[in-house]
Amino acid sequence: MGRTHPSRPTLAKVAEVAGVSVSTASLAFSGAGPITPETRDKVLAAAAGLGYTGPNPLGRQLRSGRSGIVGVVIGDHLGRAFRDPVSVQVLDGLVQVLGEEGLGVLLIPGVCGGGVTGAAPVDPAGVDPLVESAAMDVAVLVWGVLTEDPTLDALQRRGVPVVIGEGRPVDGAPLVGIDDRGGTAEAVRHLVELGHTRIAEITLPFGRDERSGPVDAARLAHVERTPTRHRLAGVRDVVEPVLSWETPASLVEHGRDAATEILGAWVPADERPTAIIAHSDLLAAGAVIAARELGLRVPEDVSIAGFDGLDLPWLSPDVLTSVHQPLRDKGAALGHAVIGLLAGGQPDSTTLGVGLTIGTTTGPAPR
């Protein structure tokens, strides 16, 4: 004999017990609409007596035509993204705002292959399968869009609205950016005011090919990532760097490798850069580590500045001179843009300010 299970109480049953229509009972649970507090209390009391906890979420999604899910395209491998406190803090602000609205988050790498030991090379035309098939009401492209972006193309083919962080403008898409060009220029001016004339640069990735090496004029003409383009421009608004070194990702080890080459023992002391501007704090921290390993003093022999304003206690006793950006606020702004799109609002652009914080890693140029 099979065991019989009590059926789940329904909204119709709650309405019957409360003596109201099903539509009125639905309004009691939605928290909106023309319903008196007394009627709402009566419906909720009937629901409690029946053990009814609310409308079925799947049914509500089907009726509304929405999934309740926001796709968040990281644009990098998730393991590497979660090693970067910049990504973590932006996601923290974004998820908090979306969570307060009852929206779920689907994290999407947004790249295929490459960047990790044993992985296949990045396919420039590759798109993560989730971009092509996952249910989502809006997609957030956290780190912008490339000049030619297959992820954006796929989302637009599907008719998924997008919100863009730090990318090129896209018609119909809210854009949340920061004044990274102005902030980078401020950091370089600080170095110039300290007397530095031989200033080198460690850059963020230019595109999806994850290259490491010195940058020439031809390479500068092919920058696909907007944050990289802005920070390159900020440096050149003030000086032409004596050397620019591209990295495959914003990680400490890439900054260390770049600075080891820039400051290497094979470089004559009178030609060695006396300052390095890094496009991120993790790259700058790697440069500090490389300088220590080479026996150079920071900042007496070489000054190093970064971008992000991260708290890096493990770098002690050094405290980075860095351009501070409002990471959680940027994530929150992305979240509010999502909510605005879902409410039928008009796309709007937001640019958040940044500011230079002087630490212990920059000082007067050596004589």
Image (cartoon, rainbow, N blue to C red):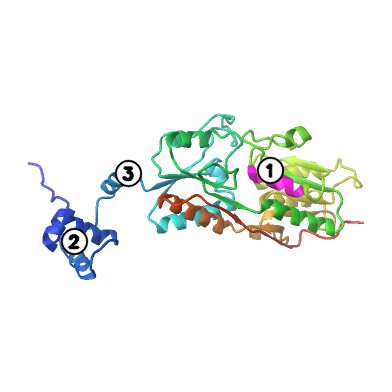
Magenta segment range? 226-235
Amino acid at dot 3: Gly
Q: Residues within 10 Å of mark 2 (few under 14, many from 20)?
A: many
- Give the alpha-carbon distance from disc 3 to disc 2, as whole Å: 26 Å
**Which image quadrant: the N terminus?**
top left
Q: What residue is pinned by disc 1? A: 229
Residue sitting at 60 percent across and 59 percent down? 326
Q: Is residue 227 magenta?
A: yes
Between residues 60 and 199, which one lies in front from this camera angle?
60
**Which image quadrant: the C terminus?**
bottom right
Q: Residues within 10 Å of mark 3 (few under 14, many from 20)?
A: few
Between residues 343 and 3, which one lies in front from this camera angle?
343
- Please state the horizontal and vertical placement of residue 312, each as a whole percent of the image: 65, 58
Checking the image for residue 65, the label placed there is: 3
Is there any visible trace of residue 83 in the rendered image? yes
Amino acid at dot 2: Ala
**What secondary structure is marked by label 1?**
helix
Q: Of the residues under marks 1 and 2, which one precedes in the sequence?
A: 2
- Give the alpha-carbon distance from disc 1 to disc 3, as whole Å: 39 Å
Q: Of the residues under marks 3 and 2, which one precedes in the sequence?
A: 2
Is there any visible trace of residue 256 in the rendered image? no
Q: What residue is pinned by disc 2? A: 47
Q: Residues within 10 Å of mark 1 (few under 14, many from 20)?
A: many
Q: Furthest residue to the left?
A: 1
Q: Is residue 203 magenta?
A: no
**What secondary structure is marked by label 2?**
helix
**What secondary structure is marked by label 3?**
loop
Amino acid at dot 1: Arg
- Please state the horizontal and vertical placement of residue 343, each as a whole percent of the image: 40, 52
